[in-house]
Image (spheres, rainbow, N blue to C red):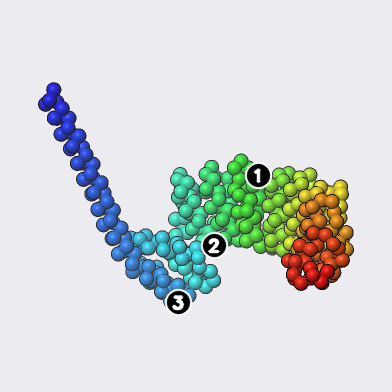
Amino acid sequence: MFELFSVTMLVLLAVVAGTAAGIVVVRVGRRIRHRKLAALAAGPRRALLAFVADNGEEGAEDLIAIPDDAWRAALPAALGLLSKLRGDAHAALVSVFLHRGAARAALADLHARSGVRRARAAQLLGDLELREAVPELCDLLTDRDHEVRVVAVRALGRIGEAKAAWRLIASLDQHDPVPSLLATHALVQMGREAEVVLSAALDHPQARVRAVCLDALGLIGATGAVTRMARVLSGDDVLDVRVAAAANLGRLGARGALQPLIDSLDPPAPDPLRAAAARALGDLGAPAAVPALAAHLDDAEFPIAHEAAQSLRRLGPPGHAELRDRDNDHCREALALTRPELVSAS
């Protein structure tokens, strides 16, 4: 019995010693590998920084000639620069990546079985701003992996190709869609060329899609869509969408938005929409809105009276005059935020 116990203890000690030795070997090997990679990447990294410092005017041939193993070691630094640079320096670094075959490899990796590889490839193609990759990136908008879809949306936004707008909008109407703010940002990056598609999507059956398109139209300054947005403001079935329409009509600052917003100040419009319209009139910046806003300074609903007063504050002297003529808490608060001395003057 004692001999069996001794043998067992010896075996356990051997296992523990072997495990400890294995851990030490792995750690030492990892440190050696990291040092080798750092030494291998040092030269290319210096060349990259010099290339960027020269705004990409010199040194491209040297970067293209870097051996593959050294380039792989320096690739994280190169990718970091690629995602941050803009203008001529970015275009020059893109040329280096293209000459090294990065685009071909990334396009192939879009079809990899690994979601991580697909996402990395989409990120690289977006940073390269490669318009030829747009159709295949659009295919990733329905990828089974949520993170891949998120990266694809970011990449399409970075590329800024308006032809992808409809595919991006359609992808919002699916299970587990990408975040609305991310989709809005990508659509805004596509610019005014996406305005027609965004306007058409205001008739989409999904409320979330309509709200995203309204935000994108407001942010790109699509004044040509005022009539369509006003129609959503007055007739959409979903209150949140109507509120989004009001906010973005105010953001546009177009003359055609004035009357639709004024019409939304009164019942039967729901109170949240009335408050949003009052706030939007202040954003619109039209002095012609002063009488309509002044008529709601004593509104029975607190948010509406509050927003009316704050909008009058933002409309300058005509609005300030109306605030001084009224004696209520909303007006005093708005005046205090404008110029404290106006409170005592009133």
Q: What type is the residue that disc 1 sits on?
A: Asp
**Separation of disc 1 and disc 2 at Cα?**
26 Å
Give x and y (percent) for residue 190: 64, 60
The local secondary structure at tag 2 comes to loop
The local secondary structure at tag 3 comes to loop
**Separation of disc 1 and disc 3 at Cα?**
46 Å
Q: Nearer the viewer, residue 178 or 311?
A: 311
Q: What type is the residue that disc 3 sits on?
A: Asp
Q: Is residue 284 left or right of residue 77?
A: right
Q: Is residue 85 left or right of residue 43?
A: right
Question: Which mark lies nearer to you, 3 or 2?
Answer: 3
User: In which quadrant of the rendered image does the C terminus lie?
Assistant: bottom right
Residue carrying label 3: 54
Residue carrying label 1: 173
Residue 32 visible, this angle: yes
Question: Which mark lies nearer to you, 1 or 2?
Answer: 1
Q: What type is the residue that disc 2 sits on?
A: Glu
Q: To which quarter of the image does residue 175 belong?
A: top right
36 to 50, vertically: above or below: above
User: In which quadrant of the rendered image does the N terminus lie?
Assistant: top left
> Image point 71% across, 58% down: which residue?
217
First-in-chain label (3 vs 2): 3
Give x and y (percent) for residue 114: 45, 45
**Separation of disc 3 and disc 2 at Cα?**
21 Å
Residue 163 visible, this angle: no
Q: Residues within 10 Å of mark 1 (few under 14, many from 20)?
A: some
176 to 72, vertically: above or below: above
Residue carrying label 2: 129
